[in-house]
């Protein structure tokens, strides 16, 4: 059995230094997270607010916590004071609420817009045409306490590497199009969060700047 630090170093050796790793620590213990922390990892991703809050208080304060899972509107206020980035903004309503809670917390919260690129029906996010019409209203420009830093997407869970590559490419193309159309004066619109343990190489080949890696670092998760 290799350790968490070894797994992280192996992963680092396989990706360009410009690509950031979000260590997805959902279901993993504080001790396991600390092993990754001690190996230099600072960005951790969780998908449940309750679990995140419980672990956060037991871990070093310089960890940058990223919310990567579906976020209910009524839970935003519980994380607004500290969350470093929210990858899973799947509606303008949610963005509006994040903005309001960030304002109360006197913060500006970095957000990614989640785009639905996969085949599966269970995956959430904006459809590509929906996001275009949502941004076309310009409403998002009034939100002074959120910074839209880019897009997030998940490819279909399949061995069909051609499909996965096409899905990541479509996200990259959408990113470029939206950047030109709506964010040409926003240099912070620069992140493409795509790629997980099984498909991060394909994602990097299509321009990922942030990969979200759980099982390759921490080992397989026990099914809840
Ligand atoms: C669990 C999860 C990951 C990490 O999955 P692995 O296959 O274990 O790397 C990445 N992104 C999201 C949104 C997740 O929920």
Image (cartoon, grey):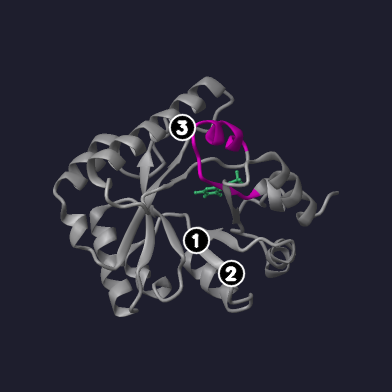
Q: Nearer the viewer, residue 113 or 210?
A: 210
Decide: is 60 above or below 25. below
Q: Secondary structure at mark 1?
A: strand
Q: Is residue 30 left or right of residue 55?
A: right
Which of pointers 3 and 2 lies earlier in the amino acid sequence?
2
Q: Is residue 77 left or right of residue 83?
A: left
Any magenta on residue 211? yes
Residue linked to disc 1: 66
Q: Quadrant of the C terminus?
A: bottom right
The residue carrying pointer 2 sits among few (fewer than 14), some (14 to 19) or many (20 or more) residues within 10 Å by Cα, namely some
Residue linked to disc 2: 63
Q: Please, which residue is most extreme toward the left here?
A: 137
At a point 60% along the width and 34% down the height, the residue shown is 201
At a point 79% along the width and 51% down the height, the residue shown is 6
Measured as percent of width and height from the top left, residue 194 is found at: 49, 42
Q: Secondary structure at mark 2?
A: loop
State which region is magenta: 198-214
Q: CA distance from mark 1 to mark 2?
A: 10 Å
Q: CA distance from mark 3 to mark 2?
A: 28 Å
Q: Which label sits on residue 39?
A: none
The residue carrying pointer 1 sits among few (fewer than 14), some (14 to 19) or many (20 or more) residues within 10 Å by Cα, namely many
Decide: is 161 above or below 224. above
Measured as percent of width and height from the top left, residue 79 is found at: 42, 72
The residue carrying pointer 3 sits among few (fewer than 14), some (14 to 19) or many (20 or more) residues within 10 Å by Cα, namely many
Quadrant of the rendered image containing residue 42: bottom right
Q: Nearer the viewer, residue 52 or 19?
A: 19
Decide: is 129 above or below 218. above
Q: Which label sits on residue 168?
A: 3
Decide if ligand 1 comes within 8 Å of the CB at mark 1.
no
């Amino acid at each position: 059995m290799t350790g968490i630090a070894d797994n992280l170093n192996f992963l680092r050796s396989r990706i360009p230094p410009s690509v950031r790793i979000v260590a997805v620590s959902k279901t993993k213990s504080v001790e396991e997270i600390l092993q990754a922390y001690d190996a230099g990892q600072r960005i951790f991703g969780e998908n449940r607010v309750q679990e995140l809050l419980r672990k956060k208080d037991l871990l070093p304060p310089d960890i940058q916590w990223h919310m990567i899972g579906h976020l209910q509107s009524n839970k935003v206020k519980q994380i607004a004071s500290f969350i470093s980035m929210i990858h899973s903004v799947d509606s303008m309503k949610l963005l509006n609420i994040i903005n309001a809670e960030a304002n109360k917390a006197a913060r500006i919260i970095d957000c990614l817009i989640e785009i639905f690129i996969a085949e599966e029906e269970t995956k959430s996010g904006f459809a590509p045409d929906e996001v275009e019409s949502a941004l076309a209203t310009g409403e998002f420009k009034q939100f002074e306490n959120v910074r839209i830093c880019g897009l997030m997407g998940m490819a279909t869970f399949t061995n069909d590497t051609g499909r996965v590559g096409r899905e990541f490419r479509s996200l990259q193309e959408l990113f470029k199009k939206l950047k030109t159309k709506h964010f040409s004066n926003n240099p912070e619109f620069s992140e493409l969060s795509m790629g997980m343990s099984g498909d991060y190489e394909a994602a990097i080949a299509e321009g990922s700047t942030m990969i979200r890696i759980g099982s390759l670092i921490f080992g397989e998760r026990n099914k809840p």
